[in-house]
Image (cartoon, rainbow, N blue to C red):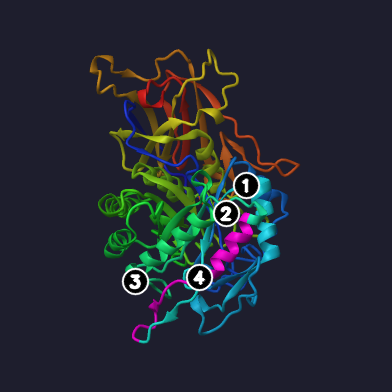
Amino acid sequence: MTNLPCLAENIEVTIRGETSIAKTDDNFICATLDWWPRDKCDYDDCPWYNSGILNLDLDSKILRNAIKAFSPLRIRVGGSLQDRVVYNVGYANADCPQFTKTTDGLFGFSKGCLPQRRWDELNDLFNQTGAKLTFGLNALYGKKQSQEDKVLKIGDWNPRNARDLMEYTICKGYKIDSYELRNELCGTGIAARLESEQYGKDFIELKKLVTELYPEASTRPKVLGPGGFYDERWFNTFPQVTGPDVVDAVTHHLYSLGAGVDHSTINKIQDPHYLNQVAQTYQDVIKSIKDFGPWSGAWVGESGGAYNSGSKDFSHTFADGFWYLDQLGMSSTFNHQVFCRQTLVGGNYGLLNTETFMPNPDYYGALLWNRLIGTKVLSTRHNGSPYFRAYSHCSRNHNLNVENIQNSVLQPGVSLLLINMSNSTHFDVSIINDFNLYPEQHQVSNSNAISQREEYHLTPKDGDIRSEVLLLNGTPLKLTDSLDIPKMEPVLVDSSSSISVAPDSFVFVVLRCFKAATCA
């Protein structure tokens, strides 16, 4: 590696804490499990192995511990092949075919089946680990191909097989947080599509079914859709067809880094101007919801950075965090309640290694966000380089480590994520509390009763952003001898000093006595 001369820049980050600008779900971090079989290949690379829903080793201690660590982790079960899956559960007498490669099937595969035994095994995993489950239903069940448009599917959705699944699920006491109908069938579609008017009618049927089978409103699963890429006309029409109180959350997908085979993408993930382009999509989705479906929230239902199984060059390395952590921060400022990472395990973009289940660097970034970053999003700005990002939220207090902090008193506090995309500039950061309602009280937030703050510095091993080894405060993160997720302890720093953000690094910071009225 070439050692670049290190420059230094002082930056003031200003936070307004009187009110929040957005709010996320308490379980903002989400990861997906996909249906792909082991012979799913892209660009002569077959990175799925036994990581699909039907062949995943559900008894893996590493997998179970990785899920448990989030307490709870939101998991979305779905993906491209979900609209090819039949459920052989309960009273269903459907054939139970296996996914096989075919030239005339959707995405190159035949229909597949979820056997009852596998559904039981999956729910045992979710129950034992405390996961919150979103299940993606087959939206093409009962539909046929249009004679005029070979991609268009027409006809009403047949809810019979979905009812079979739900009735069995209820009978067994399995907990479902939400049901999602369809995967990437909106707009122009991917391999197949539905018109928004027809999908709205199908969605009303799903809502009726869920309401019938789950009569108790307090425990009724939410219904989500459309689970695809944003198309303005389509997303505007869909909620007008359904009307109010049908769609609980509008889910959309993002793969803003392009194809996984593009070797130049490694440069895009450290280009703030390129990363900023997706902000327009976040804003457009929110505008569609505000104008036509204000009863719904916004979710990123699936996002893996690079599409077609991710990049074998960087999706599993430290470098991917420049995209992933920045998107967590950016999407939350645009009032998105949930961000589902493609995948928990599977492909090149898994939070866990596809073969060993060992955590990749982004896993630890997601876990720190989950433990430190609360639901209320604060207005955050700075006067420095575009290669420096700063996001702040009210702290997630009940997970914060308060041991050994001088004069510690549990306060709401503020947590920050700082990202240095530059490989040559060191940033020294001061945090300013903008008391915009009370300008006479304007002060540096660090002058408070607690003399120390918590810092979690994430850097790549040997300074190589393509490393699969993540350092926390200079120490490699690795599983314990008993295969548990390691403790992630902060360094305690004098609050009167500036925050040192090294080149090519991410820093989570917890300020316990930052005076933010909305966090109280």
Question: Mark 3 is on which residue type?
Answer: Glu
Q: Position of residue 117 (x, y in %)?
A: 71, 64
Residue 323 horizontal side relative to residue 351, left or right: left
Which amino acid is tagged 2?
Leu
Q: Marks 1/4: CA distance?
A: 26 Å
x 59%, y 57%: residue: 345
Residue 19 in picture, x, y percent from top left: 32, 29
Q: Is residue 416 visible?
A: yes
| Real-space Cα separation, disc 2 to disc 3, in angstroms | 31 Å
Q: Residue 122, labelled with which disc? A: none
Does the magenta segment cover residue 154? yes
Q: Would residue 53 be counted in the magenta stretch? A: no
Pick whichever of labels 2 and 1 is earlier in the sequence.
Answer: 1
Q: Residue at x 38, y 58 (%)?
A: 256
Upstream in sequence: badge 2 or badge 4: 4
Find numbered disc 1 in the image and state the secondary structure of the residue it sits on: helix
The residue that label 1 is drawn on is 67
What label sits on residue 83 in the rendered view?
4
Give percent across and percent down for residue 97. Answer: 64, 77
Give the mark, 1 or 4, whose residue is nearer the N terminus: 1
Q: Nearer the viewer, mark 2 or mark 4?
A: 4
Tell me the tag on residue 344: 2
Residue range in magenta is 148-170
Q: Are marks 2 and 1 in contact (CB under 8 Å)?
A: yes
Which residue does the image show at 48% across and 39% down from the upper left?
A: 26
Separation (CA) of disc 2 from disc 1: 9 Å
Residue bearing the label numbered 3: 195
Q: Residues within 10 Å of mark 1 (few under 14, many from 20)?
A: many
Relative placement, left or right, of 7 versus 344 is left
For residue 138, side relative to residue 299 (left or right): right
The quadrant of the picture occupied by the C terminus is: top left
